[in-house]
Image (tube, helix red, strand yellow):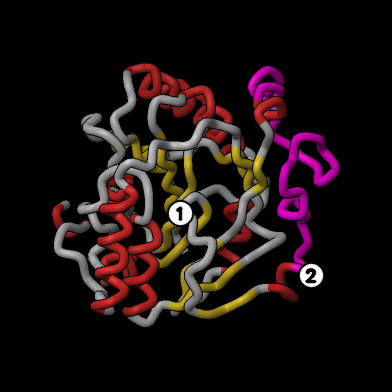
Amino acid sequence: MLTSLIITTYNWPQALSLVLQSVANQTMLPDEVIIADDGSTEETKLMIERFSKKNDIKVIHSWQKDEGFRAAMSRNRAISKSSCDYIILIDGDMILHPKFVEEHLRNSQEGFFLQGSRVLLSKEKSKQIFTNSQLSFSVFDSGLSNRKNALHSNFLSLLLMKKGVFMKGIKTCNMSFYKKNCYTINGFNEEFVGWGREDSEYVVRLINSGIARKNIHFNMIQYHLFHNEEARKSLKKNDHLLNQTIKSQLTWCDNGINRY
């Protein structure tokens, strides 16, 4: 099954560089990497070009003009450029466990999307990582605020895997799905501008269309570099859009991926 790894980013090339290095270290490489760039400056473009020259990985830089936080649009643009059957979404501040891609593919299943978790790194630990270019972590490392998520175990992953239509803990920083299911619901809703809820609304429409959630722990591990939180001034409007989708049991958004 051909796989696209899509990485969202905005003006943090230092973090994206570490993430791409962790991609190059995967036990199973994605067939292509697509950078969903929400308007970064030239520095990010040059870093991506340097990485591409040093690594035998197909990298596509999907860039859009900087007009504020438009993650839904950025993801749609990137997905529309995918030539693969399966999509893995991460953010550009997530360092990946070497088996991350392999385990997304192993756990993939028709009729489901996958939701993974993340390990949160402290501010001090993140500074050390940038200094040392650290890509390998242990559950016993200092600076891990939710340490249990760093435990890698195939046995526990199978034992505690959960299927259903629940919404708690939706995060597109560690999610995967079949591309055909994304197109069935017209991708992400680009009415969502500003931080928040575009991922939850996307999942509501997936579930309404018959695609259930498969929740994975202790596999598909990623490490989240510390940064200040995004401004949440658009959250009230975005909550309203989410609630409309829930109330009306929508499976389709008008302003979606069909634009591309």
Residue range corresponding to the magenta coloring: 127-156
The mark lying in front, picked from 1 and 2, is 1
Q: Against 113, is 149 above or below?
A: above
In the image: residue 213, left or right of residue 257:
right
Q: Against 234, is 252 above or below?
A: below
In-front residue for pair 77/188: 188
Task: Based on the picture, tell me whether residue 252 belongs to the magenta stretch.
Answer: no
In the image: residue 132, left or right of residue 213:
right
Residue 116 sits in quarter: bottom right
Q: Residue 172 carries which label?
A: 1
Residue 223 sits in quarter: top right
In this rendering, does residue 31 appear at all? no
In the image: residue 96, left or right of residue 74:
right
Task: Based on the picture, tell me whether residue 151 belongs to the magenta stretch.
Answer: yes
Mark 1 to mark 2 CA distance (whole Å): 25 Å
Which residue is rendered at x = 46% and y = 21% of the image?
50
Task: Tell me the SS state at disc 2.
Answer: helix
In-front residue for pair 233/52: 233
Which residue is rendered at x = 48% and y = 36% of the image?
229
Question: Residue 170: x, y in percent?
Answer: 49, 61
Q: Against 196, is 13 above or below?
A: above
Question: Residue 60: x, y in percent?
Answer: 35, 38
Q: Which amino acid, by three-letter code, is at mark 1?
A: Thr
In-front residue for pair 83/247: 247
The residue carrying mark 2 is 155
Q: Against 161, is 194 above or below?
A: above
Question: Residue 73: x, y in percent?
Answer: 25, 47
Graded by Cα atoms within 10 Å as few (under 14), some (14 to 19) or many (20 or more), the crowding at tag 1 reads many
Which residue is rendered at x = 78% and y = 61% of the image?
153
